[in-house]
Image (cartoon, helix red, strand yellow):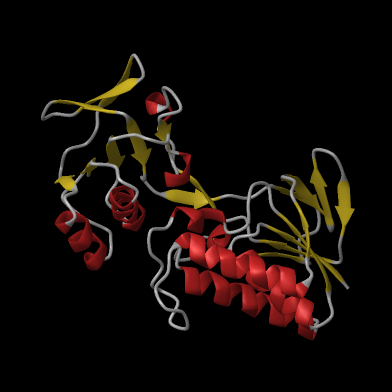
Amino acid sequence: MRVGIVGAGPAGVTAAVFLSRYGIDVTIFEKEEIGGLIANAWRIENLPILSPCSGEELIAVLRKRLEESRVKVIYEEVLSAEDGVLKTKSNSYSFDKLIMATGTKPKRIEDFELNRSVVYEFKRLPRGIGRLAIYGAGDAAFDGALKAKEVGIKEVHVFNRTDRIRAVPKLVQLALSSGVKYHPSEPIRKVEDRHGDLELYTDVGCYQFEALLLCLGRVPNLPVLRGETKDLYVVGDASGNFRQLAIAMGHALEVCMKIVRGE
């Protein structure tokens, strides 16, 4: 049996390693780098079997497990899936089963995307900046704020559209105690490019920053799916689940057991 897995984040790697243990021929496709969004994480604490670690540390573990399992990795973006065939820009690949572990993509604000200093992932931020604005109030926003402080960004502001915080309380407490400035019920209305710097306008006033990290939520990210789907499985965050690492990995294992059992 040949299984194609799209996405080398935690769910995709979990599926690849598990299936390889059963002697199944597995190929995993990744358009960027192994680990997916966890590369942005300051701290990962929701995997009970592991001590708290950074995103980079967990990625090192995933890479090692893939190498040990001798899973083939193809670094190409999958554009579509149809009747067991994955199509990339350069080639087509046929499989008996397909697993989509493609994760999520950000909810965008295109009007704010003025230059490369406006990003949706921490790893995309310009290097050497001293002033960062973060828009959003979930785990990604406060985790990003803590990572910003850790890498030496001196001034970090978190703007929230409402007064409701959706992040783990511990993250919020750590961020505030590290000197992050929090702006509840202060939505960003407009962003302007001022000779490379960014001017952010709210109902309270105008602020100047060197970069803006947008953390306003994410939605499932899937390639174009056509034709027969009975041998195609969507796992992890791409399935619209709870965006929890342990849940995504567990979901991948559940699907793999169905494949192994021939269900």
User: Horizontal and vertical percent for residue 141?
Assistant: 32, 50
Q: How many marks?
A: 0
Please tell me which residue lies in front, 132 or 216: 132
Please tell me which residue lies in front, 144 or 2: 144
Image side of residue 8 versus residue 140, left or right: right
Please tell me which residue lies in front, 220 or 196: 196
Which residue is farthest left? 204
Please tell me which residue lies in front, 200 or 154: 154
Q: Which residue is drawn at 47% across and 39% down?
A: 124
User: Horizontal and vertical percent for residue 240?
Assistant: 51, 60
Q: Residue at x 43, y 28 (%)?
A: 110
Q: In this view, does 14 lie above or below 162?
A: below
Q: Residue at x 23, y 67 (%)?
A: 170
Q: Quadrant of residue 119?
A: top left
Q: In this view, does 130 lie above or below 112?
A: below
User: Horizontal and vertical percent for residue 50?
Assistant: 46, 79
User: Horizontal and vertical percent for residue 259?
Assistant: 76, 78
Q: From the image, which quarter does the N terminus lie in?
A: bottom right
Q: From the image, which quarter does the C terminus lie in?
A: bottom right
Image side of residue 118 versus residue 65, left or right: left
The answer to whether residue 43 is seen in the rendering is yes
Which residue is farthest top? 195
Image side of residue 93 versus residue 124, left or right: right
The answer to whether residue 235 is seen in the rendering is no
